[in-house]
Image (cartoon, rainbow, N blue to C red):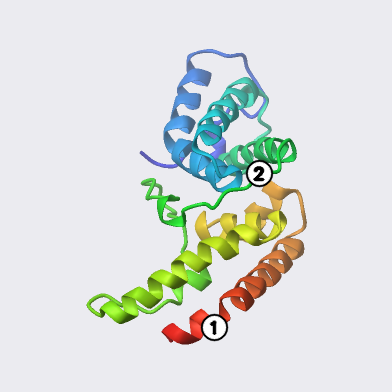
Amino acid sequence: MGVTTTGELPSGQGERGPRHDALFCRLVAEYRTRVWHLAYQMLHDRDEADDACQEVFYRVFRQLSRFRGDSHPYTWIYRITVNYCTDIMRKRSRRQLVPLEETYPSTGESDPPARGAVVADLPSTMGNPEEAAGQQELVLALKEALDKLPDHYRLSIILRDIQGLAYKDIARILGVPVGTVMSRLYYGKKKLRKMLGHLLDDVE
């Protein structure tokens, strides 16, 4: 199944009907996995991610006929997700460690999630127990370091390096200029490397 394009959406015209429902089902099939994992990465809780995913697509269903079509469908859906999860995060302060190895599996979409720069630069250690142990330590430290970042840095890294979105799409989702996205990525990754520097040296 190909990715739904802007031209296939109602673009703010027409009433709910078979075409509306068919498009909604297609959007759910294409983006449910990514929406769930984005919610999980933000909320740190599987049950809350389940609830968020249901709420996001409920809002998508209600708003689909009013979609203006001036951005890609996934940009619109991700923005709904980010806004909803941000509201939830404001209502609570508890934060848990997110297991990165469980996030963002392949969704079958044509543009799969990219690997983050910090993770992608790690050397392969298969077949070498000592090096593998060192890399495992780095992965665990990366989980903790990412969770310690301020939310605006962490979310930018999630959208760019895990979800694999373009700068302009992240900017639309977050409602900030592209330059702000690039700045958040730069300083967020700088903070990560500062927290992980000694471990990166050990595995190089």
Of mark 1 and mark 2, the one earlier in the sequence is 2
Q: Residue at x 48, y 38 (%)?
A: 31
Residue type (three-letter) at the residue carrying disc 1: His
Determine crowd level at label 2: few under 14, some 14-19, many 20+ residues with C-alpha closer than 10 A.
few
Residue 66 x, y percent position in the rendering: 68, 25
Q: Nearer the viewer, residue 119 or 134?
A: 134
> Eyeballing the image, is 134 above or below 78?
below
Residue 91 x, y percent position in the rendering: 73, 35
Q: Is residue 148 left or right of residue 178?
A: left
Q: Residue at x 67, y 47 (%)?
A: 173
Quarter holding the C terminus is bottom left
Secondary structure under the numbered disc 1 in the rendered image: helix
Q: Residue at x 57, y 81 (%)?
A: 197
- Residue designated by label 2: 94
- Residue designated by label 1: 198
Quarter holding the N terminus is top left
